Amino acid sequence: MERIWDKFVTEEDQAVFQAAGYGKSIGYGKRPALVVIDVHYSFLGDEPEDILESVKKYRTSCGRRGWAAVAAIERLLAVFREKNFPIVYTVSERRKDFFDSGVQRGKNFRHEESTTLIGSKGAEIPPQIAPREQDILISKKKPSAFFATPLMSYMNDLDVDSIFVVGGTTSGCIRATALDSFSYNFKTTIVEQCVFDRFESSHAMNLFDLNTKYVDVVDLEEAIHYLETLEVRA
């Protein structure tokens, strides 16, 4: 099967991949949770449009790539809700003085823009995939959804054995969350159509690297097919 990263991987990389034995599938768990990372307007834009148009208002926007993932996430959410599996959302939002950005303030030119403020539209999740009353919503300040949040305690309380990570961006918060999930010994799955990034190359190669060493990157239809085989959570 053709993978999204194939056009970026050299022949030598492919040879090393095969010879060194990377890329074995870790498989799914029986008690999954879904973690939806930062799918809010400041990372999407107000509507599906070219990224260079979208960044005129939200400089963190991923444009159409993000909105394509929203449609895929909506399908995945429907299965998780049908099975009564836990769903966690995160938002990346900042207080008015941006103190909670920490050293990130020195890494980019957009750290003091109002589109990231707590309570702003930029921090809102689109209604088609918005959290419901029974879901968990976490405000995070760093890339990983696990860092300095109660996420791990929630996963313990819910007796979760595996985590599906979706949202954005692939090279940032998706990668950081997936690595922490792996480090905590959760079987971790990234659904390819449900993640997005503003840079095509970063998106593809981070998925390649994560699939090579840490998690399983799977197709949406495969993920849905597996989830539908599981019993409804009591």
Image: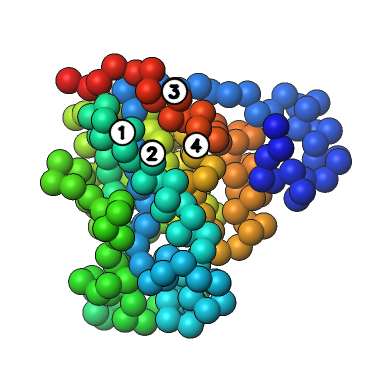
Q: Tell me the CA gap for discs 1 and 2.
A: 6 Å
Q: Tell me the CA gap for discs 3 and 2.
A: 11 Å
Looking at the image, do the residues carrying marks 1 and 2 touch, with CB atoms under 8 Å apart?
yes
Establish if 48 lies above or below 185: below
Disc 1: which residue: 80
Q: Residue at x 15, y 41 (%)?
A: 134
Check the image and name the residue furthest to the right. Answer: 11
Which of the labelled discs sits on residue 226, or is there none?
3
Q: Which residue is more in the foreground, 71 or 134?
A: 71
Q: What element carries label 1?
A: helix
- Callout 1 crowding tier (Cα within 10 Å): few <14, some 14–19, many ≥20: many
Q: Which residue is drawn at 83% across and 33% down?
A: 15
Figure quadrant of the N terminus: top right
Q: Please state which amino acid type lies under the numbered disc 2.
A: Leu
Q: Please state which amino acid type lies under the numbered disc 1.
A: Phe
Looking at the image, do the residues carrying marks 4 and 2 touch, with CB atoms under 8 Å apart?
yes
Establish if 60 lies above or below 25: below
The x and y percentages for residue 153 are 22, 36
Disc 4: which residue: 220
User: Is residue 10 in view?
Assistant: yes
Disc 2: which residue: 76
Q: Which residue is drawn at 71% across and 37% down?
A: 2
